[in-house]
Image (cartoon, rainbow, N blue to C red):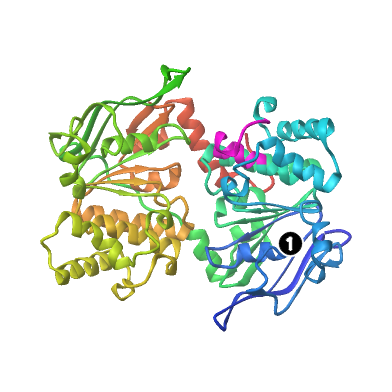
Amino acid sequence: MSGGPLLSVRDLSVAFTQGGKTSTAVDHISFDIGKGETVALVGESGSGKSVSALSVLKLLPYPPASHPSGKILFDGDDLLAKDEDGLRKVRGNKITMIFQEPMTSLNPLHTIEQQIVEVLSLHQGMRDQPARKRTLELLNEVGIREPEKRLGAYPHQLSGGQRQRVMIAMALANEPRLLIADEPTTALDVTVQAQILELLDGLKRKNGMSMLFITHDLGIVRRIADRVCVMTKGKIVETGPTGEIFANPKHEYTRHLLAAEPKGRPPATNTEAKAVMVGDEVKVWFPIKQGFFRRTVDHVKAVDGIDIQVRAGQTVGVVGESGSGKTTLGLALCRMISSQGRIRFEGKDIDRLSFKDMRPMRSELQIVFQDPYGSLSPRMSVSEIIEEGLRIHEPSLSADFRDKRVVDSLREVGLDPETRFRYPHEFSGGQRQRIAIARAMVLKPRFVMLDEPTSALDMSVQAQVVDLLRALQEKHDLAYLFISHDLKVIRALANEVIVMRNGRVVERGPSVEIFERPQTDYTRALISAAFRIETAPTGVVSE
């Protein structure tokens, strides 16, 4: 850091006051970021990473947020001491920020062009043709293909990776000196994640920009960061060069983070086990209608003739990029959407059954969704959420027996039954996912579709949830359809793997075969993208 640091955080504390009570979220932390340097702030959810980053630009709600101590020096100026007018000259100009979920960060009512031009207009007074030209340059720079065709697009018309690229274009529009990236790749497929990391690293080097990278994924840190600050419970417990932190971690919490990933391997497929769910030539085609009479002119072939068999006590993992048809296949097998082809559950044909006729079987076909916060009703207590299925499928049960089943289910997933009268917002992400699993398991299902159940969780919580699912499967002889883009989780849990692309199966086979001897270029690309993030040396972007 020749010439002194670009950003210097000194003795920073962040507190929140609500209902007369004050809690400390960040407790006297200090770190520096040099010119052209990438510093990673890592830790689990609730450690204080994002609150620290938001404090740099004073983006927290004041009140209830406050700073009992500390300074944030940017080029020698204390940002915490600046008023709103002073901060406006820094925000979006000298320091910019990329958030985790671009769909909620971008304005759904404005086109991509309008949103990028707004940044250029506010900070540079650039309008009309010059602004349009600069917008096209930025979209080209971040790898948006045929940018002229994307200018009039709205955020919902872009993929997750494209939306994140637009966010990066907006962040880089004014050539900032510091970029704050808050979990920018968490919700993305492994291949898109690798592309975004490569893009950020390349742009940083090209523009001589500094970066504060916030993440809970240490594989990403190893690839992109020069130095690491490890946070837990609002404190930085260890800091140092990336290579040194990974090779010789000093603090117990850092060692815990490094060891926290799904472990173990599933047993070999038992071909003698009973087939619980079987699909033959399953198709889900969505019509494309045009013209005044809305005639069907073509179809989106979301699932295009797939055979699948899920056996008792075993897991079939379905992997592929967003839009490959993974979730659509699972919903079709569970008869949540209409499909063509034969579907048998426990030997019974269910593909011709109406949704009403399917209702008695729903207790045996359960789904655990990706986002437990979105799938759990915020107006119901945990007890009410878990017993809702019992009220519908086993109405003859007494209130006391329902409560006993709820208590047993919570114990089974490792939660304290005394917490069953609380509401979802009072639990962490990992605890909410356990509640979602308990809701499914209380009905004693035979088949469970798990749709990205670990993608939004910290690495250590991911490992705990995988261990829990494995234990429940062994105990109840459950058949799992596990949908994910996280190949580390699939490798730990799935007996058999199906690789999907554009609605079709490109490769299938035992998990060991797929991961050790992939046969197709697409499968090799997925595996390379997933595992090169962990193995690429610091500062080197592998192709």
Residue 208 seen? no
Q: Residue, x 79% and y 64% (percent of image)? A: 84
Q: Which corner quadrant holds the C terminus?
A: top right
Residue positioned most to the front:
292
Q: Position of residue 275 (x, y in %)?
A: 18, 37
| Residue 361 to residue 18: above or below | above
| Residue 23 to residue 332: above or below | below
Residue 504 shown left or right of residue 121 in the figure: left
Residue 4 shown left or right of residue 203 in the figure: right
Q: Which residue is mark 1?
A: 57
Majority secondary structure of magenta residues: helix
Q: Residue, x 80% and y 30% (percent of image)? A: 133
Residue positioned most to the left:
396
Q: Residue, x 55% and y 65% (percent of image)? A: 254
Is residue 537 a member of the stretch shown in magenta? no
Q: Position of residue 126 (x, y in %)?
A: 84, 39
Residue 219 shown left or right of residue 298 in the figure: right
Q: Residue, x 14% and y 59% (percent of image)? A: 395
Residue 43 seen? yes
Q: Position of residue 247 (x, y in %)?
A: 60, 58
Q: Which corner quadrant holds the N terminus?
A: bottom right
Residue positioned most to the bottom:
20
- Identified by mark 1, the residue type is Leu
**Quarter of the view holding residue 269:** top left
Q: Position of residue 112 (x, y in %)?
A: 67, 37
Nearest to the observer: residue 407 or residue 89: 89
Is residue 163 a member of the stretch shown in magenta? yes
**Magenta stretch?**
151-166
